[in-house]
Amino acid sequence: MSNFNRRDFLKISGGLAVGATVVGCATNLGGAAKARVVVVGGGVGGATAAKYLRMMDPAIHVTLIEPNKHYHTCFMSNEVLSGDRSIKDIEFGYAGLAGHGVNIVHDTVTGIDAEKRMVKTADGDSFMYDRCIVSPGISFTWGAIEGYDAKVAEKIPHAWKAGPQTVTLRKQLEAMRNGGTVVIAAPTNPFRCPPGPYERASLIAKYLKTHKPKSKIIILDPKDKFAKKGLFTQGWKRLYGYGTDNSLIEWVGGAAGGKVESVEANNMVINSQVESIKADVMNVIPPQKAGKIAFSAGLVNKKGWCPVDVATFESHIHKGVHVLGDASIATKMPKSGYSANIQAKACASAIVAMLNEKEPGVPSYQNTCYSIVGENYGISVGMIYKYSKAKNLVTPIKGSGGVTPKDASMETLKREAHYAHGWFDNITHDIFG
């Protein structure tokens, strides 16, 4: 067994509870062929699982297949839009994982044969596995908004997968006239990073307040409430005049007709249920579903998401295949980077146990979500979750979490912003370091 013991694991995983017999067990593979795990997708869930599998049991041969040489984190990508970070600041490679003994293959997975336990790639290679982890991320439901599809998104970026579209949207904001209108169309539930659209509006407002103060941001939203709504709107009042005639931010909820029905890309007009708005910069975030490979592998339900055993993240449809991150139905946990990171560790622990013919431990989970509202102004929400085997549920433990207090002092909010940036440094090192 490796020199990675249970105490180390608990320390690094931030409190994830797993059985000592799982993490501390010695591999029983002996002189037999190494167990093989193939990880499809090198985002937060996939990269974390690959690294932790090797840390927990170096006897396991782990291959991670990912088409891109670099990954851009969605978390903190809104700070690229405000100009507080460059795109390079949220870019990470896979050398760290290779250093842990993960076999990195840059290729596109074209199919997963669950019966033969084989993954196929665009280059014509095949990878046999004992266990497969799929971390496909999200894809978009094109056609849900008339006039908005993948081609139009190159001109009117969603920027909901950080990378080139993030850079495009930043350039559009820089080129916009002072006095221009930015329209953000928020998606329907469920979607990746529930507070993300509202942090985005906040950080665009932060940029405009300094550089183009006559401008305005309108959020069109099909929902009547959103994550951390009270804290966001309080921050908008303090920083951007929310609720006044001169507010930098206007939020239009579902009851007020905020649902977007169509986009006229050539005219830069967005049509909601009650009004049409001429925009200078438009950011349309479409409805979402599991990533493409989850569909071709037959891992999704009728709603487009992947049902799993929430203790091991093994698919309810294909045994031997585990689905992580935003694509999985993790019941009460939000679709966030931190959730994917924690779930990946529980999944890795369960797989190590199963490959060593042991029962997986009983997991508990946690999630913390930071949002930056403005200069030295951060807010957060945290929660601990328990697992119910009988109901296959992950549910919040009452009284275990916390949010930034309402009416918190500016010193507290400044400290929250520092915590957010520290969290980013720590989790990206935990995933890719």
Image: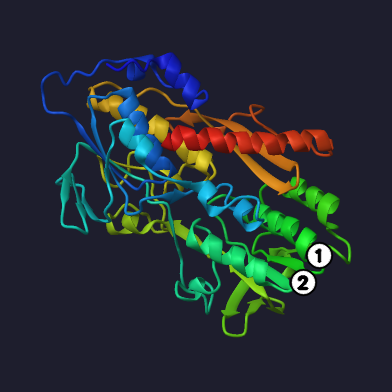
Q: Which amino acid does label 2 sit on?
A: Asn
Q: Residue at x 68, y 35 (%)?
A: 418
330 or 51, which lies in front? 51
Q: Residue at x 72, y 78 (%)?
A: 275
Q: Residue at x 43, y 33 (%)?
A: 433
Residue 47 % position (x, y): 38, 40
391 or 403, which lies in front? 403
Residue 253, image quadrant? bottom right
Residue 39, image quadrant? top left
142 or 304, which lies in front? 142
| Residue identifier under label 2 | 178
Is residue 279 visible to the viewer in this orientation of the structure? yes
Tag of residue 38: none
Q: What residue type is labelled 1?
A: Pro
Taking 139 as reference, is 99 above or below it? above
Taking 282 as reference, is 10 above or below it? above
Residue 145 appears left or right of 28:
right
Taking 32 as reference, is 103 above or below it? below
Residue 270 % position (x, y): 64, 77
Tag of residue 213: 1
- Give the spatial CA distance, label 2 vs label 1: 7 Å
